[in-house]
Image (cartoon, rainbow, N blue to C red):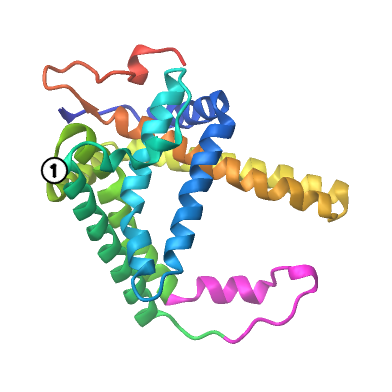
Amino acid sequence: MKLHLVPASTGLQWVKLGVKTFFRQPLAMSGLFFMFMAAVSVISLVPVLGTAISLALVPAATLGLMAASQEAFNGRFPMPSLLISGFRAGPAKTRNMLILGAMYAAGLMLVLGVSAVFGTDVSPPAEMPEGDVSPEMVRDLFANQGLWAAMVLYLPLLMAFWHAPALVHWHGVSPLKSLFFSLLACWSNKGAMLVYFFGWVGVFMLVGLFMSLLATLLGGSQALNLILYPMVLFMASMFHTSIYFSVRDSFMAEDGTALPDSTSGDNA
């Protein structure tokens, strides 16, 4: 396994493949994402250690969603058991996945701690009718130094853990080395990653515009809420489905051939 450099346009291909693969198994993919979020939310309610444990499970759950995306892309139904794929590959890989999870939890807790240190106190927002957002609320949010500190610190953390679960599980890389290779892969393919990011920003903006127009037509009725929450779930699931393709195409076999299911070998 070695790093595979891809053109910037591949980022848009990852977005398209994520959307297309999601719609092959929309209920299964959204159901798995909901199960992941529900499990993390319940575990986080455990006193003292709940939050840390739920964060430590994120890399393994991300790997499970990647495995589900792989199954859906290949025309197979992703089973719920795929969510725990990271803990079913033998003691060594299970231990490495747990170590990776502990590192992620520690890193994110550090980011949140620094954010709290740099954060500024803001006055309670004035009451707005129907939960509207006031300009003052937006101004205070972007003026908060803690927010910017968290964003600056979280970006390298996100890059380090983007490929790491797949490297640990599918390629047998140690947790520490997986973080280094993930950072290197994200930076080397930064053009594709930027196109991928802005591609999803565009998708979310289009969906947001559609929901705004729908809200205007429905006049803010309860029917909108029945559409809004499933839509948010579908969009989040769709995004997580696309992560698999960004990971898959960033590495190739040692002989220089593309790994199985690479975008270079299909016309999806």
Left or right, 111 with reference to 127: left
| Magenta-colored span | 123-145
**Looking at the picture, does residue 79 appear above or below residue 190?**
above
Q: Which amino acid type corresponds to the residue marked 1 in the rendered image?
A: Ala
Q: Residues within 10 Å of mark 1 (few under 14, many from 20)?
A: few
**Looking at the picture, does residue 217 appear above or below residue 108?**
above
Residue at image coords 25%, 50%: 160
Q: Quadrant of the N terminus?
A: top left
**Looking at the picture, does residue 58 appear above or below residue 255?**
below
Left or right, 71 with reference to 232: left
Determine the image quadrant of residue 71. top left
Q: Nearer the viewer, residue 110 or 101?
A: 101
**Looking at the picture, does residue 66 appear above or below residue 257?**
below
Left or right, 114 with reference to 77: left
Residue at image coords 76%, 75%: 128
Decide if residue 9 is in sight here: no
Q: Position of residue 198 (x, y in %)?
A: 48, 42
* Residue 129 falls inside the magenta stretch: yes
Q: Position of residue 120 (x, y in %)?
A: 45, 83
Residue at image coords 13%, 43%: 92
Determine the image quadrant of residue 246. top left
Decide if residue 104 is in sight here: yes
Determine the image quadrant of residue 206. top right
Q: Nearer the viewer, residue 215 or 195?
A: 215
* Residue 206 falls inside the magenta stretch: no
Q: Nearer the viewer, residue 9 or 93?
A: 93
